[in-house]
Image (cartoon, rainbow, N blue to C red):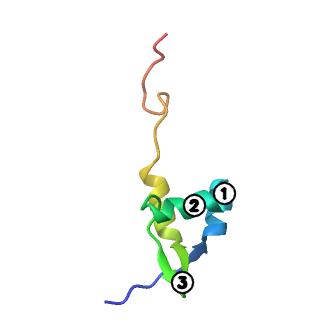
Amino acid sequence: METQYQTLITQQELARRWKRSETSISFASAVGVGPRYVKVDGLVKYPMDEVQRYERDRLFLNPTEAGLQSLS
């Protein structure tokens, strides 16, 4: 089975996108947290579609968007 990725980003690019340190991105990958990644020549790369899927899976509605009224 052949897998093709259109866009791969580096840990540095992901850190910039999320405004986090490269160390925190690297640590998250090491412990299995974060978007799925591939290793290319020993370097961790993130398929952009996996990054976007990870972000979508963590979206939360605020009460106004959900149609809920204020509790006050």
Residue at mark 2: 25
Residue at mark 1: 21
Task: Identify which residue is drawn at 62% across, 60% down.
Answer: 23
Describe residue 17's horizontal placement relative to residue 7 as left or right.
Answer: right
Q: Amino acid at mark 1?
A: Ser
Describe residue 8's horizontal placement relative to residue 17 as left or right.
Answer: left
Q: Amino acid at mark 3?
A: Gly
Residue lying farthest top? 72
Residue in the foreground of this view, choosing between 58 and 30: 30
Local crowd at mark 1 within 10 Å, few (<14), some, or many (≥20)? some
Task: Identify which residue is drawn at 50% across, 59% down.
Answer: 28
Local crowd at mark 3 within 10 Å, few (<14), some, or many (≥20)? few
Quick check: 66 above or below 46? above
**Distance from the alpha carbon under mark 2 to that under mark 3:** 16 Å
Q: Amino acid at mark 2?
A: Ile
Determine whether the residue tagged by mark 1 lies in a helix, strand or loop: loop
Badge 2 or badge 3: first in the primary sequence: 2
Q: Position of residue 1 (x, y in %)?
A: 31, 89
Determine whether the residue tagged by mark 3 lies in a helix, strand or loop: loop
Quick check: 17 above or below 2? above
Is the residue under label 1 in contact with that under label 2 (CB below 8 Å)? Answer: yes
Is the residue under label 3 in contact with that under label 2 (CB below 8 Å)? Answer: no
**Distance from the alpha carbon under mark 3 to that under mark 1:** 20 Å
